[in-house]
Image: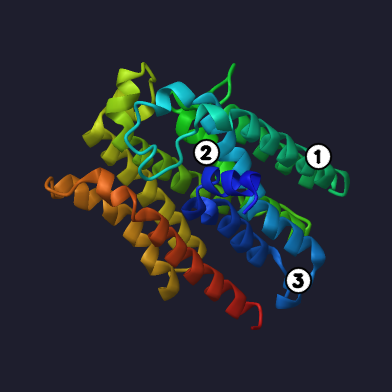
Amino acid sequence: MNPLLTLALSVSRFRFWIYTGGTYVVGYALGMGSWEAFLLPSYAVYLFYFFFPANVFIYGVNDLWDRETDLKNPKKGEREHLLEEREWRSLVVLLLGVSALSAALLVSQTMAERAVFCAFLFLSYFYSAPPLRFKEVPVLDFSSNMLYIMPGVFGYLLASGSFPPLLLIAAGYFHIAAMHLFSAIPDIGCDREAGITTTAVVLGERRSLALCLVFWSACAALVLFLAGLHPLALPVLLFPAVPLALLLVRTVNTAAAYWYLPYLNTGLGGLAFAAITITKGI
């Protein structure tokens, strides 16, 4: 396999592709008028982009600017790719390639689509990169993860020509805020040692879990309201159940539970997609 492609696959964190690609698909499905919209070339182009190149960009920038702190992170080298010194130049080439592709896509977009797409790129880059480096600023660290909602907003806009309801965006915000905070809990020790002040570092494990419970409860309440208490929406209650269980049962390891969240997101995202497409006439 081509060395650049191998590096791109390693850096992009395959198990997290669903966070951008899946969000795009669900957003597009919510906005489309009928299932025929899935046959449009524009849908396929951005499906590819948000599943693969977008994740090369997000995590490539992250790995580029976190080289020193990643050496102290136990996840790196075991569960996630640890960038080696010899790979630095290749990663820069990959990031320039994705940037060029992103710039090319901007040409054919409407003004509204361009605004959302640029917001996605801005948040993806400055989450990790200086001088803003949102990941080291409490509250802004989880708020800047709106970058994962942007593909859904873009998909909805691409399919319908209008923005999604604000309550739907709010539900997405609460979800990504909880997801980010939850994922930062296992890193509290190494982040504190590296001098990185995240929301999780400031709050500590227990209070971080409590805030995750609040965020996911708010998300679940909004989803159930928007869905009219439809039975297919009830599994969203599994999200607040996770931090609640960890708060009540102290023997369960938060770090271990963290690795199962992509499966929960994929499962519930697939359920949402199925429910939406059924209502569109499939």
Q: Is residue 149 visible?
A: no
Amino acid type at image mark 2? Asn
Residue 226 in the figure: left or right of residue 51 = left
Number of dots carrying numbers: 3
Q: Is residue 176 visible?
A: yes
Residue at the (65%, 50%) spot, across then down: 2
Residue at the (31%, 36%) spot, across then down: 185
Report the front residue among 142 and 84.
84
41 is higher (above) or lower (below) than 245? below
Report the front residue among 95 and 282.
95
> Which element type, helix, strand or loop, lies under badge 1?
helix
Report the front residue among 68 and 19.
68
For residue 103, the mark is 1
Q: Residues within 10 Å of mark 1 (few under 14, many from 20)?
A: few
Marks 1 and 3 sit apart, C-alpha to C-alpha, by 24 Å
Residue 74 location in percent, x, y?
A: 32, 35
Q: Are marks 1 and 3 in contact (CB under 8 Å)?
A: no
Residue 241 in the figure: left or right of residue 65 = left
86 is higher (above) or lower (below) than 20? above
Marks 1 and 2 sit apart, C-alpha to C-alpha, by 22 Å
Residue 206 location in percent, x, y?
A: 22, 36
Query: Which image quarter holds the C terminus?
Result: bottom right
For residue 153, the mark is none
Residue at the (52%, 46%) spot, across then down: 10
> Which element type, helix, strand or loop, lies under badge 2?
helix
For residue 145, the mark is 2
Q: Name the colouring of the figure.
A: rainbow
Amino acid type at image mark 3? Ala
> Which element type, helix, strand or loop, lies under badge 3?
helix
